[in-house]
Amino acid sequence: EGALALAKKVDETMSMFPKRIYSIDMAFDSRDGQWKIIEMNSQPSASPRHTGESYQIFQEKLADFLLS
């Protein structure tokens, strides 16, 4: 339930991109009972050539989210 809530929060943050593909590695921290993002990969196996002009914007939005 907690992992799904975190995944939904990530997807809502990225909703400005109509075509988005990413993977999220998460782990449960038993010390505080929270799910944490370990790693998030934008456009797995894709390159700017495949994603067009929105690639850099996507990368910047992803970085802002991970740093928040």
Image (cartoon, rainbow, N blue to C red):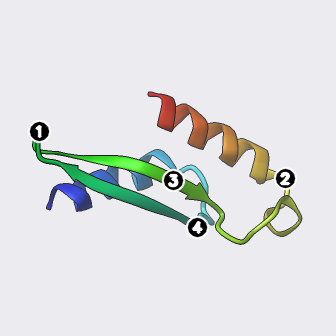
Say whether marks 1 and 2 touch (CB < 8 Å): no
Image position of 32 (left or right of 42): left
Is 31 on the left or on the right of 10, as rendered?
Answer: left
Residue 28: give x, y in percent of width and height.
Answer: 21, 53
Against 67, is 29 above or below? below
> Gap in Å between the C-alphas at discs 1 and 3?
22 Å
The residue mark sitting in front, 4 or 1, is 1
- Type of amino acid under label 4: Ile
Q: Is residue 37 left or right of residue 61?
A: left
Query: Residue 53: which disc?
Result: 2
In what quadrant of the picture does the C terminus appear?
top left
Q: Earlier in the sequence, mark 2 or mark 3?
A: 3
Q: Which residue is mark 4?
A: 21
Amino acid carrying label 3: it is Met
Quote the CA–CA distance across marks 1 and 2.
42 Å
The mark nearer the N terminus, 4 or 1, is 4
Residue at the disc numbered 1 = 31
Asked whether disc 4 touches disc 2, contact meaning CB atoms under 8 Å apart, the reply is: no
Is 44 displayed left or right of 34 in the figure?
A: right
Q: Circle 3 sits on which residue?
A: 40
Q: Amino acid at mark 1?
A: Arg
The local crowd at label 4, few if under 14, some if 14 to 19, many if 20 or more residues have their Cα within 10 Å, is: some
Image position, residue 44 (x, y; %)? 64, 68
User: Which element type, helix, strand or loop, lies under badge 4?
Assistant: loop
**Labels 2 and 3 touching (C-beta < 8 A):** no
Which mark's residue is nearer the viewer, 1 or 3?
1
Whole-percent x, y for residue 26 in the image: 34, 56
User: What residue is rendered at 66% in x and 63% in y?
Assistant: 43
